[in-house]
Amino acid sequence: MIKIAISGAAETQNCSENVNELAYEIGKELAKRNIIVVTGATTGVPFWAAKGAYENGGFVVGFSPAIDKKEHLEVYNLPLDYHHLIFYTGLGHSGRNLILVRSGDGVIFICGRTGTLNEFVIAYEEKKPMAILLGSGGEEKYMDEIINEAKKGHDKIIWEADPIKLVERFIKLIENEYN
């Protein structure tokens, strides 16, 4: 089964007004296609994508920065909702980000802040298939600039404003990559 990691802002004040709905729609579309959704077991965009997948029959796995459930809830103040499994990495945000990116066959980026940029750079460096939801806000505006400045080839990136088309195009890209 294909696994797609969701990367996006845990706090969405710098995102588009409808970012939660967009993330939910992406999660829902992934579930409809029997894609496993992988998140950072956090709030904001990943939470809404997880909810969209979970409520529509999808399977959702989370990787928490916390060492255990207690730390997840009490130190990081993160939810447990809408995940079938949560792995407690104990690696903080940066370590968790590496595991999240590597666990997916590809990564979808929806809005974002510095953690999302961290995941973006990891995925870019490792030439993972990537999909960026245009118009979602946040650090999305810097992603093209980073790619241009890096001057490294990466031909597995999809830029798309429509969440349904993004999922369709991205799954085709991943299937072509791994078949």
Image: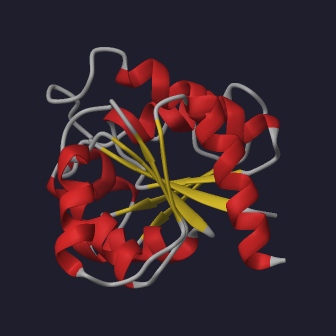
Query: Residue at coordinates 71% horizontally, 42% vertically from top-left?
Result: 168
Which of 169/61 is in front? 169
State the scheme by which the image is colored: secondary structure
- Quarter of the image that includes the N terminus: bottom right
Measured as percent of width and height from the top left, residue 73 is found at: 30, 46
Which of 119/48 is in front? 119
- Quarter of the image that includes the C terminus: bottom right
Work out whether residue 90 can be spotted. no
Query: Residue at coordinates 40% horizontally, 23% vertically from top-left?
Result: 20
Q: Is residue 8 left or right of residue 158?
A: left
Q: Is residue 104 left or right of residue 161?
A: right
Q: Quadrant location of residue 141?
A: top left
Query: Residue at coordinates 36% horizontally, 45% vertically from top-left?
Result: 42
Counting the numbered discs, the total is 0
Measured as percent of width and height from the top left, residue 70 is found at: 32, 54
Work out whether residue 167 can be spotted. yes
Which of 173/66 is in front? 173
Residue 66 lies, with reference to residue 15, above or below; the image says below
Measured as percent of width and height from the top left, residue 126 is found at: 43, 84
